Amino acid sequence: AQSVTQPDIHITVSEGASLELRCNYSYGATPYLFWYVQSPGQGLQLLLKYFSGDTLVQGIKGFEAEFKRSQSSFNLRKPSVHWSDAAEYFCAVGTFLGGATNKLIFGTGTLLAVQP
Amino acid sequence: GAVVSQHPSRVICKSGTSVKIECRSLDFQATTMFWYRQFPKKSLMLMATSNEGSKATYEQGVEKDKFLINHASLTLSTLTVTSAHPEDSSFYICSARAPWPENTEAFFGQGTRLTVV
């Protein structure tokens, strides 16, 4: 069965420091992978996605993620964190039907706190 | 990107009453929409897939008669929580599948916080 694991429930980093959020997936076929960010009481905003091609994916707000098939990972990174990055981050694997996205399976999320 | 609007953003209702939540795709037609539920400090769990003009497909363990989904047009899907109870209190989020050729992506609404008292 498909699943997504985000090992870190809560991470605190200093503003300006680098960030890496971990994500591991289990999926029987080629995975379609996503990272979303959620601010308190808000919906989800897509940061980036991977379908195929270059395994290093660039997203919005200076985020990037690298797909590593051998490790079944899709870790999210940012070289320098800003206070406004404090939020909850969700990794997801997409299942597809007929070439279109069917549903997303989410990890449990990582809550990022940024300290001055 | 495409915009999905969810209404209301917050609702408080009395136990035993029904609540309707709307999910609209504002600038595109969405043949498929998804309804998720998010428990406190938990991930999002898919409740059902809503297809325009047909019955919704519910995930295992989701009560169809309690969570009524209607997708009557290409821009609107509704979730009605019937005979709500305090355990139905949660954050409900919808998403809409983008039209081709971006149909590998789904756009999310801002969510509805339901509190049943």
Image (cartoon, coloured by chain):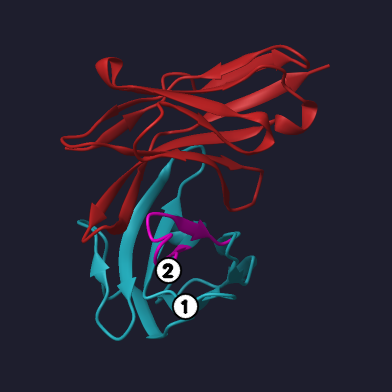
Chain colours: A red, B cyan
- Label 1 neighbour load within 10 Å: few <14, some 14-19, many 20+: some
x, y percent for residue B111: 57, 60
At x 36%, y 77%, the residue is B69
Q: Is residue A48 left or right of residue A70?
A: right
At x 42%, y 69%, the residue is B99
Q: Which chain contains the residue that carries disc 1?
A: B
Q: Amino acid at mark 2?
A: Pro
Most extreme residue toward the front is A53
At x 64%, y 65%, the residue is B10
- Residue B29's label in the rendered image is 1
3D distance between C-alphas at marks 2 and 1 = 7 Å
Front residue of A66 and B54:
A66
Residue identifier under label 2: B99
x, y percent for residue A96: 25, 53
Earlier sequence position, callout 2 versus callout 1: 1
x, y percent for residue B47: 33, 59
- Residue B107's label in the rendered image is none
Q: Is residue A116 left or right of residue A51?
A: right
Q: Which chain contains the residue that carries disc 2?
A: B
Q: Which residues are magenta?
A: B95-109
Q: Amino acid at mark 1?
A: Gln
